[in-house]
Image (cartoon, rainbow, N blue to C red):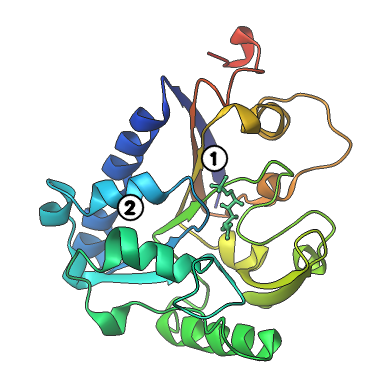
Amino acid sequence: MASSRVIKVLPDAESVHGAAAERFLAAAREAVELRGRFMVALSGGSTPRDLYRRLAESPYRDQVPWARTYVLFGDERCVGPDDPRSNYRMAMDTLLHRVPVPVEQILRVTGEATDPARAAAAYEAELRGLFAAEGSARFDLVLLGVGTDGHTASLFPGSGALEETSRWVAASFVPKLGSWRVTLTLPALNAARRVLFLVTGEPKARVFAEAFGSAPHPSPHPCELVAPTDGLVEVLADRAAASRVPRDAGGP
Ligand code: 6PG
């Protein structure tokens, strides 16, 4: 039972998305071969858009075992599925409308619910049903981004959801955004077989250096707390995001 972390710096965002697509395909093929299904949690935000578009095109559209893939979400904004802010809508528009994942294998968070806590509990119940045999949220792959404040999924600094030790899904009010989110918790994220962080662009340089490059900072960022008990964490970054990491510490 061990967690390991690999950090890879690539020339640019396009090469990050290319490497991520290859890892997505490899994880999907391995999961289907070994366990008959591929359980993946998608990230929201803007970084993964181009990865999702690439997965919707050849060769990945034809090579990923979409019929055996179950698509879940690492977090969701508390908005409806057609809202432009919805992570579900972003994934549908860039990927899921364009590949043959059975609709019943796409499980969205009901962000439109008037009670975010009930939406979180309902999502957790679905997850626990899907992972009943494993007894934990044993995703084959969890895609995650990193905010400039070090948040990941919707686990923001200072959030009570960071303290959750048993529930897999939590509702969290984000003061800086003035809005509610539903998010996988650390017990869920840290049950994964594989976590893949995508971090691109100069605006992420400070948080990348702190979270992944050992630059001093007062307290761990939420993204640093993602360390699966028996899984691999891989961080794919472009040179711009890694630009504040000294070369002898793995910087570009
Ligand atoms: C969300 C994401 C969030 C995202 C980071 C980075 O719902 O917004 O799940 O955790 O990954 O905020 O966002 P960008 O990729 O847009 O920088």
In the figure, 109 relative to 42: above or below? below
Q: Is residue 94 left or right of residue 7?
A: left
User: Residue 42 falls in which quadrant of the image?
Assistant: bottom left
* Cα–Cα gap, marks 2 and 1: 26 Å
Q: Hey, which residue is sitting farthest top in the picture? A: 248
Residue in the image at 42% along x and 69% along y: 89
Per the rendering, the mark at residue 4 is 1
Q: Is residue 211 left or right of residue 74?
A: right
The secondary element bearing badge 1 is classed as strand
Query: What's the residue at 62%, 8% (across, down)?
Result: 248
Tell me: 63 left or right of 147. left
- Picture layout, residue 194 above or below residue 107: above
Type of amino acid under label 2: Tyr
Q: Position of residue 139 (x, y in %)?
A: 44, 64
- Picture mark count: 2
| Other-residue count near label 1 (Cα within 10 Å), few / some / many at <14 / 14–19 / ≥20 | few
Task: Tell me the kind of residue under disc 1.
Answer: Ser
Regarding residue 165, the answer to whether it shows in the image is: no
Other residues around mark 2 within 10 Å, as few (<14) / some (14–19) / many (≥20)? many
**Res. 84 mark:** none
Q: Is residue 224 visible?
A: yes
Image location (x, y in percent) of residue 219: 85, 41
Q: Earlier in the sequence, mark 2 or mark 1?
A: 1
Residue 152, compared with residue 103, is above or below; it is above
Residue 170 pos. (x, y %) = 68, 76
Element class at badge 2: helix
Rendered image: mark on residue 52: 2
- Comparing 36 with 164, the one in front is 164
